[in-house]
Each structure stands twice: as C-alpha cells, then as structure tokens.
Image (tube, rainbow, N blue to C red):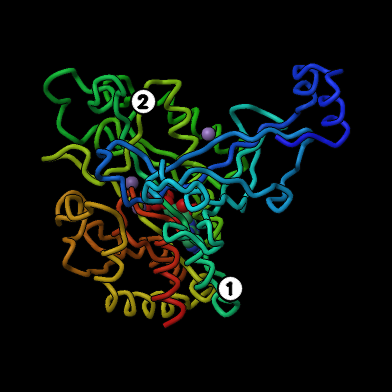
C-alpha cells in the first residue's frame, strides 16, 4: 500500500499506530491474471490457470482501469519465468484492463482483470490479450464482431476428486436425464451454479444464462454477445468467480475436455460469432462465406483450440472428429453449426463447436477474426 505524505510523516514520528493508518483503507482490489496454459498439464487436469492477489487503497479508485496502478508478481512461481537468482528479471508486470464490482466482498471492492508484461515491458508470451489487440484493428472493429461463449465445466469433489455428486464407487445412471434436468437424482451442484450466476450478474458481466449438462455434475454458463476483448475479460472473470466460489462448496471446477473417460460427454466451449453483415436480412451469404474460409484453416484453429481436445473431438458425443471439418444446419455432429433459428430467419450468427472448455477465449476470438474478417 502507499502512504500519503502526511501519513508517512506521522508514522515516522511514531505518533500514530499502524492500526490507525490501516483504518483509513477503504477499498480492496483483487488483481486477476492468467498464468498461461504451458504448465497446466504437468499440474494435473483439475488445476485452473488463473491467479490473483489483493491490493488495498485509501480511497475508492472507481471503475476506470487506468486509475489503478500497475503491480507486479514473481513469474517464477507461476510457471512464467525460469527460476533465477536475480529478482529483477522475475518481476512480471500486471496492467489493469477491466474493473468490475466484486460480488463476493461487496462495494466498494472490485475485481481487476490484468494483462501480463515481461520485465522488459513487452507483452509476456502468455499474454494472448495483447495478440488479440493487434488483430482487432480499426478495419476489424468496423465489422462490429460479436461473440457468445458457452463455457462448459465439470464439478469435482475437492476431497475425493470424483465428479461432484457421483457415488464414491461405481457410476451414476447412463447419460440421458441430466441435461437441463431437475431433481436431486439428476442434478448435482446447483447451489454453486446458482451462486455463480448471481455473482456474475452482480459483477455486471454479460452472462446470458446457465444450464446443467449431459454428463451429471457438468454445467454450462454463457457469456455474450460481446466484443472480442470483453469476451476474454468476462470469461476469465467468470472463471475466476467459479473457482473462488467453489472454495466455499468444496468443489473444484475443471475445464478438462474429457474429465471422465468412456461413454460420457466431454466438455467444450462452443463459440458463437457474427459480424454486422451477418446480423441483417440476407446475412446468410456472409455466414456461408465465413464458413468457407474456416474450412481452409481447420488445422490452425484446432492447434490452438485447447489442450487434449483430441480426447473430446472423436465424432461421438455431439462432436465432429478432430481431423474432419463439417458444417451443417442444426447438426450437433458438425464443426460449425448454423443454428436452426438462424437458418429459418436467413441471418444471425454461426456456432464454432470445436473449442475445448479449456481454450483461451482471447485466442478463439483472435483466430475467428483472423480467418473470417481479415482474410
Ligand atoms: P446452444 O443452443 O448451442 O446451447 P446457447 O443458448 O447456450 O446455445 O448459447 C448461444 C450464445 O450465443 C449466447 O451466449 C448468446 O448470447 C450468443 N449469441 C446470440 N446471438 C449472437 C450473435 N448474433 N452473435 C454472436 N453470439 C450470439
Ligand atoms: Mn512476497
Ligand atoms: Mn449452450
Ligand atoms: Mn453445452
Ligand atoms: Mn452450443
């Protein structure tokens, strides 16, 4: 924390106790950042990629991210720097880019989404938001791209590391009754899913809904429609809230694309995408043109659409095989789906069904813009 000149003077003279000075602090800001996915697999599949720490302020700093000072952390402790004796090359810089109300601590406290910079001032290689900023230039902005992200996740019991609500040994009933189900025999973990929805709304995120999923203990929330930078910021903030609230329930939410092997659905992040010309009557032509371009960049997208996605994209369980590009209307076995209401109206958006749940949302947005708008 920073002392005002007056406080520092008073402290130096020993006339005030530290307690008295700390009593003047009014705001807690939780600085949140991604540690990158490089080390994720080595950490085991249930570990998430978000980090955060708290900074206090003597006044309410408001909602403008530029009002918040940069901060730093030890990159060697987050898998973002090689261990080294020299402190100066380990300090990574956090630059605030989005501030929202903190729904857990309440007003005036905030969550602060940050970009990560290397000690030399350049964007850290894991800073995928900076890569998206490069692609999102004026020409791309003029097309008014919107994204809707369907974030699936699977709740795990933090003690047993089995899927939350599953029997201690053996399996629940086969899939069928669980998707959008109701009742204690079908739906596991609703208190966390509900608390998360409420928290996202209180934080002012563009959360469009939630539903329980095909695998019991699996859930989905949707963010959107929003622009590409907001998409990534909001998905990360919503993921952080999910993990943070999970601490209160003993539930770890995993984004692994195939948390349970066998005849159980995987976990994805369908990404819905449109530009202004797709959203007006006659927009189907623009949607089809985008799909044509996507058919030519399939391997590039797949290579960045999440870790271990090959375990999920098998051609079964509502997916298309990872090596095949297929598109269709209302076809859940396709790579790109045109939703039925969009086909009936003749305009709207497309759904990219390929991304794994552990995909980086800034990266999906960057690739869709690069392929569909820039090429
Ligand atoms: P599904 O039927 O595949 O389960 P969902 O209802 O879960 O679809 O998610 C659809 C997502 O698409 C929502 O996040 C919604 O906000 C978003 N969306 C709606 N219209 C558009 C649009 N024109 N462009 C991009 N995304 C959109
Ligand atoms: Mn320390
Ligand atoms: Mn959905
Ligand atoms: Mn789903
Ligand atoms: Mn979908």
248 relative to 257, above or below: above
State the image coordinates of residue 141 (x, y, percent, origin top left). 58, 73
Q: In which quarter of the view is residue 47 placed?
A: top left
Q: Please state which of residues 104 and 198 is positioned toward the viewer in this rendering.
A: 104
Q: Is mark 2 within 8 Å of ligand 4?
A: no
The residue at which mark 1 appears reads as 141
State the image coordinates of residue 341 (x, y, percent, origin top left). 41, 60
* Residue located at (32% from left, 42% from top): 255
Q: How many residues crowd around disc 1 within 10 Å: few (fewer than 14), some, or many (20 or more)?
A: some
Number of the label disc, if any, that sits on residue 251: 2
Q: How many residues crowd around disc 2 within 10 Å: few (fewer than 14), some, or many (20 or more)?
A: many
State the image coordinates of residue 128 (x, y, percent, origin top left). 45, 60
Precedes in sequence: disc 1 or disc 2: 1
* Residue located at (30% from left, 52% from top): 356
State the image coordinates of residue 145 (x, y, percent, origin top left). 52, 68
Looking at the figure, which quarter contains the C terminus?
Answer: bottom left
Badge 1 element: helix
Looking at the figure, which quarter contains the N terminus?
Answer: top right
Q: Are marks 1 and 2 in contact (CB under 8 Å)?
A: no
302 relative to 191, above or below: below
User: Can you see residue 319?
Assistant: yes
Q: Would residue 320 appear left or right of 89 to someone viewing this image? A: left
Q: Would residue 184 appear left or right of 95 to someone viewing this image? A: left
């Amino acid at each position: 924390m920073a002392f005002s000149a007056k406080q520092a003077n008073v402290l130096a003279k020993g006339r005030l106790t530290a307690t008295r000075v700390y009593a003047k602090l009014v705001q807690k800001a939780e600085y949140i950042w991604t540690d990158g996915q490089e080390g994720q697999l080595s950490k085991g599949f249930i570990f998430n990629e978000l980090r955060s720490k708290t900074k206090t302020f003597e006044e309410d700093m408001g909602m403008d991210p530029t009002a918040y000072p940069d901060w730093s952390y030890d990159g060697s402790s987050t898998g973002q720097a090689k261990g080294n004796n020299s402190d100066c090359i380990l300090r990574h810089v956090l630059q605030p880019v989005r501030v929202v109300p903190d729904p857990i601590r309440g007003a005036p406290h905030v969550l602060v989404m940050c970009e990560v910079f290397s000690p030399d001032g350049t964007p850290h290689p894991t800073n995928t938001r900076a890569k998206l900023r490069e692609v999102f230039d004026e020409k791309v902005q003029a097309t008014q791209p919107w994204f809707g992200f369907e974030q699936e996740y699977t709740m795990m019991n933090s003690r047993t590391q089995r899927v939350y609500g599953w029997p201690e040994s053996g399996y629940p009933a086969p899939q069928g009754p669980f998707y959008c189900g109701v009742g204690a025999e079908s739906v596991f973990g609703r208190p966390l899913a509900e608390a998360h929805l409420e928290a996202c709304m209180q934080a002012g995120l563009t959360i469009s809904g939630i539903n329980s999923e095909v695998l019991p203990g699996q859930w989905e929330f949707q963010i959107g429609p929003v622009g590409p930078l907001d998409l990534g910021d909001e998905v990360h903030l919503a993921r952080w809230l999910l993990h943070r609230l999970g601490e209160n329930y003993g539930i770890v939410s995993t984004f692994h694309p195939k948390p349970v092997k066998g005849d159980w659905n995987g976990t994805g992040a369908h990404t819905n995408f449109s530009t202004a010309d797709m959203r007006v009557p006659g927009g189907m032509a623009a949607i089809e043109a985008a799909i044509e371009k996507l058919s030519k960049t399939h391997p590039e997208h797949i290579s960045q659409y999440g870790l271990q996605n090959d375990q999920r994209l098998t051609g079964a369980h509502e997916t298309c095989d990872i090596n095949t590009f297929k598109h269709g209307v209302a076809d859940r076995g396709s790579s790109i789906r045109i939703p039925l209401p969009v086909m009936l109206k003749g305009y709207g958006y497309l759904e990219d069904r390929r991304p794994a749940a552990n995909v980086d949302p800034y990266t999906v947005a960057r690739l869709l813009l690069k392929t569909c708008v820039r090429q």
